[in-house]
Amino acid sequence: MTGENQALLIDARGIEVTYGGRGLFGRSEAGFKVLHGIDIAIRRGETVGIVGESGSGKSTLGRALLRLVPVSAGTIAFDGQPITDLSAARMRPLRRRMQMIFQDPMASLNPRHTIGRILTAPLLLHGVVADRAGAERAALAMLERVSLPAAVLGRSPHELSGGQRQRIGIARAALLKPDFVLADEIVSGLDVSTQAMALNLLKDLSREMGLAMAFISHDLSVIRAVCDRVYVLRAGRIVEQGSCAEVFARPRSDYTRQLLDAIPLPEIDPDWLGDRPMQPAA
Ligand SMILES: Nc1ncnc2c1ncn2[C@@H]1O[C@H](COP(=O)(O)OP(=O)(O)OP(=O)(O)O)[C@@H](O)[C@H]1O
C-alpha cells in the first residue's frame, strides 16, 4: 500500500482523445471523442485499476498515458516532467521507464525470435547492460525470478504455454527496470489458477521494484485482487474512484453497482495472493 504523500509518477488532467478527428493540413473534422476530460494520478509504487465495460475507453486511456495515442486536450506529466507535447525522439529516453504488458503475449512476442533474443534485445537497445554477456546474465536471473527454466531461452514463443508466455511478457517488462507498467487485460484468456499465478508474480515484482502499475480489466475480481485504488470508467468518463476497499464495499454510482452485480465475486480470492490479514498478537 502507498501513502497519500508518495510522489506522483503520472499526473494526467483533462485528457481527451478523439479518433479520426484529424483532417488534411491539421484542419479539424468531427471525430469520435472517446475520452472526455479524464483526470488520473498514479503515485510511485501504487497499483491503480481501470475498470469499465467493453468500449468504455480503458485501453485508450492506458495508451494515452504512455503517449501511444495522441491526446486532443489535457496534460500528462511523468515523474514531474510534462510529456504531452514531447516529440517521439524526446520520448525515447522515457520509453524504458514506461513499459506495457499485453493481453496476448503471442501477438507481442516475435514468433521468429527465441525467448533469449526477446529478453535480451530490449536490454541492449536501451543500454541497460553493457554487452551481450550482461544481457544474458540478467535474462537468466529474471527467468529464475519468474520461475521458468533456463532451457526456455532457446525456445520460440509458440513452444510455451499461455501462462509461460505471460510470464515472459512480465519478465521482458521487468528486466528494463521501469517505473511504470501498463497491464492491459493481461490475464483474460488464462484459466483462474494461471491468472492467480501471473497476478501474484506481478504483485510481488511491483513491491520488490517499487513499480507503479495501471491495471486495466473489465473483471472486478482481478482489480480487487491486485489494486490499491480503482477508477471506474463509463463511456469515456470517470464515474467513480477510490480505494478498492471503499469502492467495493460501498459503491457510490449505480454503474459501479451494476458492474459489481454482474460479476461473481470473488473469482480470484485475494487470500491466494498472500494478502491474508495478519493475526492480531495474542
Ligand atoms: N484506433 C481506433 N480508431 C477508432 N476508434 C477506436 C480506436 N480504438 C478504439 N476505438 C473506439 O474507442 C472506443 C473505446 O475503445 P477502447 O478499446 O479504449 O475501450 P475498452 O474499454 O478498452 O474496450 P475493451 O474492454 O473492449 O477492450 C470504442 O468505441 C472503440 O471502438
Image (cartoon, rainbow, N blue to C red):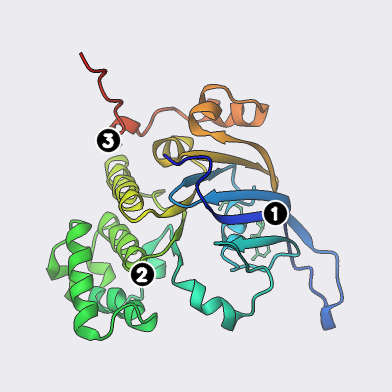
The CA span between labels 2 and 3 is 26 Å
Say which element carries label 1.
strand
Quarter of the figure with the N terminus: top left
The answer as to whether callout 1 falls within 8 Å of ligand 1 is no
Residue 13 badge? 1
**In the displayed structure image, the side of residue 76 where residue 23 appears, left or right:** right
Residue 203 badge? none
- Label 1 crowding class (10 Å Cα cut-off): few <14, some 14-19, many 20+? some
- Which image quadrant shows ligand 1? bottom right
Q: Which residue is mark 2?
A: 176
**In the displayed structure image, the side of residue 34 where residue 115 appears, left or right:** left
Q: Amino acid at mark 2?
A: Leu
**Could you say which is closer to the camera, residue 31 or residue 277?**
277
Say which element carries label 3.
loop
Tell me, yes or no, whether the two marked residues, 3 and 1, touch with CB atoms within 8 Å.
no
Q: Amino acid at mark 3?
A: Gly
- Label 3 crowding class (10 Å Cα cut-off): few <14, some 14-19, many 20+? few
Identify the residue at image location x=41%, y=53%: 186
Identify the residue at image location x=62%, y=49%: 40
Q: Which residue is mark 3?
A: 274
Percent from the top left, x then y, of residue 114? 25, 77
Q: Amino acid at mark 1?
A: Arg
**Could you say which is closer to the camera, residue 41 or residue 147?**
41
